[in-house]
Image (cartoon, rainbow, N blue to C red):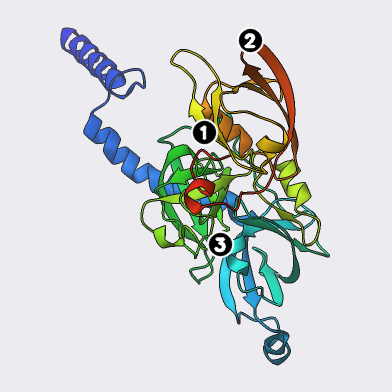
Amino acid sequence: MSGVWGLIVGVYAASLMLAVVISPGHAADPAAEIAAGDRLAPRAFREAAAKIRPSLVTIETVADTATVRAEGLGRSGDGPTSGLIVSSDGYIVTSTFHFLRQPKVITVVLSDGSRHLATLLGKDESRKICLLKIDGVKDLPVPQFVPRSELQVGQWAITLGAGYGGKEPALSAGILSALSRVGGRALQTDANVSPANYGGPLLDIQGRVIGICVPLSPHSREETAGVEWYDSGIGFAVPLHDSEKRLTALRKPGHVVRAGVLGVQLKPAEEGKPGAIVGTVLPNSAAALAKLQPGDRIVGFEGQPVQDVAQLRVTLSNYSQGDHVTLQIERGAATLAVEVELGAVPAGPPALANAPLTR
């Protein structure tokens, strides 16, 4: 009997030891965790892509109507390229890069294979996105967007592109490497971003949309600036969460949204003090018309405190030319509220007009 009892005790003790090893509350072998991650990550990437797949579209462009008459709505032209459904009634966002040649005919292929003529509506030149519209559709699947407050440097980031050919979009995975790039307008990733997936989504591991992949450059505002960096480990995506106002403005055919700028060069405030100091005020700029002066300390923007230059640049990136904003400034001992109508990017010398802090 004692032998049987000893066997039972031994089995029980072994089971306890096994429970301790596999319990989530206890440290596991790092090598085993890495191996498990290597196996699970690809599956998670595929699941994220599958979740967004119904909202991903293929865009085809044709340079002239003669091709359409001769070949029908086929795959001739520049493309295919990528786009993303943003409303159930047929609005689609993509990159302006696809329309530099001003194609005469645009078609959109939905995930079910159906092909639709599309109309190019407005463009946002500062973010290099544009809006298309297809008619005769309803109940299209709209993806979920990630709130910017949830984004963290180092989290997984996945790009999808329909421009590589084949029935399934190509997938590339990396991380979100920076949150506020190109004047605060863009997010940076090391996942592959190239002309083949411009206009396609950048996703998180849950299959939610972080942003739209576009070519951007912090050094130039040319239409094709940023293209030279493709597949380099430096790629950009424009966040779409809370962009309803901007996308609504793009619904007007021919409407162009341009970056709104103050027309100043900003300097950090003294150590320990909040705000941003106005340096040079460009002639005939929005700041000049509002009578901002060098030395003014901008401490508030639309009723919200300004902590530093970087925060002000990010805040300004959400506004467009023609928007009216109210600045709270300190000038000497006085605190003033100044209304400014944001202007266009100044002409002026390139070194000044393109200076990173000239907003």
Q: Mark 2 and mark 1: span between their CA atoms? A: 39 Å
Q: What residue is disc 2 on?
A: 333
The local crowd at label 2, few if under 14, some if 14 to 19, many if 20 or more residues have their Cα within 10 Å, is few
The kind of secondary structure element at disc 3 is loop
**Residue mark closest to the camera, 2 vs 3:** 2
168 in relation to 244, above or below:
below
Q: Mark 3 and mark 1: span between their CA atoms? A: 28 Å
Asked if the residues shown at circle 2 and circle 1 are in contact, with their CB atoms under 8 angstroms apart, the answer is no
**Residue mark closest to the camera, 3 vs 1:** 3
Asked if residue 32 lies left or right of residue 197, the reply is left
The percent position of residue 8, horizontal first and vertical second, equals: 24, 14
* Residue 140 in view of the camera: yes
Q: Residue furthest right?
A: 136
Mark 2 or mark 3: name the one nearer the start of the chain.
Answer: 3
The kind of secondary structure element at disc 1 is loop
30 in relation to 38, above or below:
above
The local crowd at label 1, few if under 14, some if 14 to 19, many if 20 or more residues have their Cα within 10 Å, is some
Residue 223: mark = 3
**Residue mark closest to the camera, 2 vs 1:** 2
Residue 151: mark = 1
The percent position of residue 111, horizontal first and vertical second, equals: 64, 63
Q: Residue furthest top?
A: 2
The percent position of residue 326, horizontal first and vertical second, equals: 73, 27
Which amino acid lies under the numbered mark 3 shown in the image of this protein?
Glu
